[in-house]
Amino acid sequence: MMCLRTGKTRIVILLFLFCALIIPAIISHAAREIGFRVTADKTVVSLGTRFQMNIIFDEMRDIPPPDIPSTEEFKIRYLGPSSRVSIVNGQMASSITHIYTLIPLKEGTFKLGPYSFNYRGDTYSSNAFTVQVITGAVPQQSAQRTDRYRKSGEYGDRAFLVMKAGKTRAYINELIPLSVKLYADRLSIRDIQYPEFEQQSFSVQAFGDPTQYREYSGGVPYGVMEFKTYIFGTRAGKFFIGPAILKGNVMTQKRSRSPFSRGAYDDEDLFESFFGAYDIFPLELESNEVPMVVLALPKKGRPESFNGAVGKFRFNLSASPREVKVGDPITLKMFVTGEGNFNTVLAPKLDLGEHFKTYKAEVSKQEKTKVFEQVLLPTSHSITEIPPVKFSFFDPVAKKYKTVTTKPIKVKVEKSDSPGHLRIVEDGKAAYMGSVPQEEVLGRDIVYIKESPGAFRKKGPYLYKNKLFLGANIFVFFIFLGLLFIEKRQERLRKDVRYARRLVAPKNARMNIKRVRIHMERGQLEKFYDVIFKTLQGYFGDKFHLPSSGITGTIVDEVLAPKGVKENILKKTRALFEDCDMARYAPSSLDAKKMGESFRSALEIIDYFERKRL
């Protein structure tokens, strides 16, 4: 019976652990699912006229580009990535977009997608869309609308800026919440800058990180980016806050040209960057003004201990140690907590009498708390307590001054064990007023001043003249420079994909050439040309930042020729691709002699591109 109960207990424990650990992990994983969608800038295109396809991953920025090969209906090339904050159809999100250009090769209606993508062991599927390819020009109406939108620069209700204040009447130094909201509908906005506004009669705190959400205005869903801060008036009067100015860039799709038209690729990199596929227009929005009345602090009932604090605060203090000897320091900590303008909270005025020597308070700021740390030196053993401390502030809600008075803190001060002849000369208030300095007998102070330095003498060699010391410092400096160079290089390799691929191109090519040589020596013709073909694909893909799987002999005319490559290299590259195709479909026409020529051509082609900067 005991064994049965123990077994049931174990089962219950295992079920509990499964529910507590496994199920939340599954839910968390589902919540982090990547948004994978596909869009196109056109759904009706002319035969041979390129258009763009965007593969968008929402809430992710490190997703590599999916490898999408060309088909019989479309020639597909990868242009590049773009990480941005986008506002589309009233929804705002951070995302990475991989841009592809497509050239239709056949007339008809075609379905693109859905595409599948594997990432970190999970498979994601996108939506599909339909593209109609027609012969002749696309109806002019939609094209004219796009041009008019680009040139006008007027966005009307599609993008506007609103400034709001938490209140329009406030006292001097009273914190006022202020927000600036960017509303956008069906616009792609990037490079958004923080709002700016000038107001000499107000002090403005720095904006925090903006928040993003969706909001309906006039029945229209807008993507909203809200910037929040606090301001407070520095003098009484009637004022206007703003207007706030916000700048950014609006991106719109650029109209594509036919790749078969004359001069379509003149002075243009076929594999242009993302910004070559979009038109970018500067955006500058201006908000409304906010009227503000700043009231002066009342003079009636203002306590003497008030020094400018406005808000609703609590005040307390602590002292340690409480048992000292004459001249030993006592640390007095004063805590101000609550809600309000901590910029105007200053150290309370201390009235400790003549038996304490004080130093300037050290200030530290935490969230909703300000701490003043004051060092006190008792100068007499007759001290029995630290007198009460007053802190006054003005409460703008209650519209009156309030004062918090602490209780006295009991301390015990004993006579100092130091000899009585130890003295320091104080020239504080008495010396400042022009009277004769007075001597005070202290048991112990922080540092005594030595009246005479005595005789100086050299003690050992100067360290900065030591060759070993200098050499060690120079060695450490060069190590630091080396580590800095390595870190910068690694950072560039992580961020600049094009640079990283160009860097590994010769290394990968050399490794593949070794495999090619082995197959040539063994007379394995099909494997020889198969590795040659993959070597050229990988090398040109890394060299020119292209999808390697889609590279064929057409790269000679479409990419290499416009870059000014020598004619004999173009011929050898073209011939080498043709030999690879021949080995695939008619291997009997090739022999060992031809393999040697192909091997030397591959070496010469790679060597040429490594020596020539393109």
Image: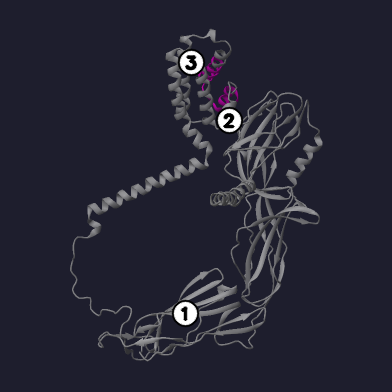
Question: Which residue type does callout 3 highlight?
Answer: Ser
User: Upstream in the sequence, badge 2 or badge 3?
Assistant: 2
11 to 445, vertically: above or below: above
Question: Which residue type does callout 1 highlight?
Answer: Ser
Q: Secondary structure at mark 3?
A: helix
Q: Nearer the viewer, residue 34 or 576?
A: 34
Marking on residue 598: 3
Residue 30 counted in the magenta span: no
- Can the viewer see residue 201 in this picture? no
Answer with left or right where residue 509 lies relative to residue 324.
right
Residue at image position (58%, 40%) is: 63
State the image coordinates of residue 442 (x, y, percent, origin top left): 31, 86
524 to 79, vertically: above or below: above
> In which image quadrant can residue 381 be found?
bottom left
Q: Which residue is mark 1?
A: 318
Q: Which residue is mark 2?
A: 547
Badge 2: how crowded within 10 Å, few (<14), some, or many (20+)?
many
State the image coordinates of residue 535 (x, y, percent, origin top left): 50, 24
Q: Nearer the viewer, residue 213 or 454?
A: 213
